Image (tube, helix red, strand yellow):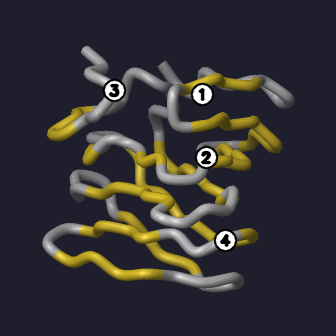
Amino acid sequence: MGIQYRINEVGERPWGTWKCMAVGNNFVAKLITVNPHASLSLQMHDFRSEHWIVVKGTPTITLGDGKKEYSFGQSVDIPAKTKHRLENLTNDVLEIIEIQMGDVLDENDITRFEDVYNHV
């Protein structure tokens, strides 16, 4: 399986977009843009961990059983097999840098628990 992303690849989603900025040995870096009042699903990944860095806006991040607001420059580590969600509860666009790390890095490594957009 390995890495399934290409540099400059863009993914359009109901909540915003992601753009692949870098691909390396067992890592991928993406710019995630979340529209105002949008959120990603409550989800988990089996094969990858993630590191998020806030570069614009004020996200509300669910990690495990906790939920916290973050600001510019703050970061959060998301271990594999940990429920998490990224929300933009503000009127402004949100941007984070997401660094995925693991042996399997692709869009199919996702288990959704709650999703307002009804992804399968």
Residue 11 shows in this picture: yes
Q: Nearer the viewer, mark 4 or mark 1?
A: 4
Q: Secondary structure at mark 1?
A: loop
**Residue drawn at 60 percent across, 48 percent down:** 34
Q: CA distance from mark 2 to mark 4?
A: 10 Å
30 in relation to 66, above or below: above
**Residue drawn at 47 percent across, 25 percent down:** 107
Residue 60 sits in quarter: bottom left
Residue located beneath label 4 in the image:
57
Residue located beneath label 2 in the image:
35
42 in relation to 68, above or below: above
Residue located beneath label 1 in the image:
3
Q: Nearer the viewer, residue 33 or 97?
A: 33
Residue located beneath label 3 in the image:
117
Instruction: State which tag comes first along the sequence, 2 or 4.
Output: 2
Q: Which mark is residue 97?
A: none
Locate residue 35, reporting x and y percent.
Answer: 61, 46
Instruction: State which tag comes first along the sequence, 3 or 4.
Output: 4
